[in-house]
Image (cartoon, rainbow, N blue to C red):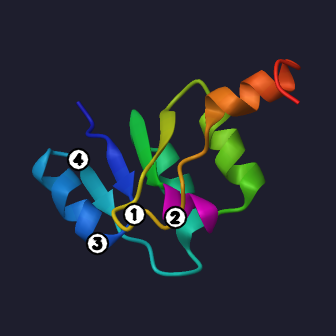
């Protein structure tokens, strides 16, 4: 079976690597290409929130909306960029919040 892929910072990647996840630490400017490559080879893509913030929003949303592979945005080690609150966004879109 093919292992999941984590795309993010080097320190977090070390922990994910210990868990058996393949890791990618992209250089600045090639984050979208790293995501595209991972989408083509992994059953699960874990994307740090910091890296997700540097990817065009349309590309990140398309990856998350696709049925396969499952793509999740996870907190980064520094916590500088918050993880998107999907539940709040859905409540707003459904008109349950102002």
Q: Which residues are magenta?
A: 49-54
Residues under numbered marks 4 and 1 in contact, where contact means CB atoms less than 8 Å apart:
no
Q: What main secondary structure does the magenta stretch of the protein show?
A: helix
Rendered view: 17 above or below 69:
below
Q: Which residue is mark 2?
A: 51
Residues under numbered marks 2 and 1 in contact, where contact means CB atoms less than 8 Å apart:
yes
Question: Residue drawn 65% across and 49% down?
Answer: 60
Q: CA distance from mark 2 to mark 3?
A: 12 Å
- Counting from the top left corner in percent of width and height, residue 65 is at 67, 31
Mark 1 lies on a secondary structure that is loop
The numbered mark at residue 93 is none
Which of pointers 2 and 3 lies earlier in the amino acid sequence? 3
Q: CA distance from mark 4 to mark 1?
A: 12 Å
Q: Which residue is mark 4?
A: 21
- Counting from the top left corner in percent of width and height, residue 11 is at 24, 69
- Counting from the top left corner in percent of width and height, residue 21 is at 23, 47
Q: Residue furthest front?
A: 98
Mark nearest the camera among 3 and 4 is 3
Which of pointers 4 and 1 lies earlier in the amino acid sequence? 1
Q: CA distance from mark 2 to mark 4?
A: 17 Å
Taking the image as shown, residue 29 lies to the left or right of residue 72, namely right
Mark 4 lies on a secondary structure that is loop
The numbered mark at residue 8 is 1
Q: CA distance from mark 3 to mark 4?
A: 13 Å
Quarter the N terminus occupies? top left
Which of pointers 3 and 4 lies earlier in the amino acid sequence? 3
Mark 3 lies on a secondary structure that is helix
Residue count near mark 4 (Cα–Cα under 10 Å), binned few <14, some 14–19, many ≥20: some
Q: Which residue is mark 3?
A: 10
Which of pointers 2 and 1 lies earlier in the amino acid sequence? 1
Q: Please check the rendered image and state whether residue 72 is part of the magenta-colored stretch, yes or no.
A: no
Question: Residue drawn 63% across and 33% down?
Answer: 86
């Amino acid at each position: 079976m093919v292992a999941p892929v984590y795309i993010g910072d080097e320190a977090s990647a070390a922990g994910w690597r210990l868990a058996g996840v393949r890791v990618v630490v992209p250089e600045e400017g090639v984050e979208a290409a790293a995501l595209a490559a991972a989408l083509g080879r992994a059953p699960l893509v874990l994307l740090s929130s910091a890296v997700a913030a540097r990817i065009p929003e349309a590309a990140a949303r398309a990856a998350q909306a696709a049925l396969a592979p499952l793509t999740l945005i996870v907190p980064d080690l520094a916590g500088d960029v918050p993880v998107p609150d999907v539940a709040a966004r859905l409540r707003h879109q459904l008109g349950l919040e102002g």
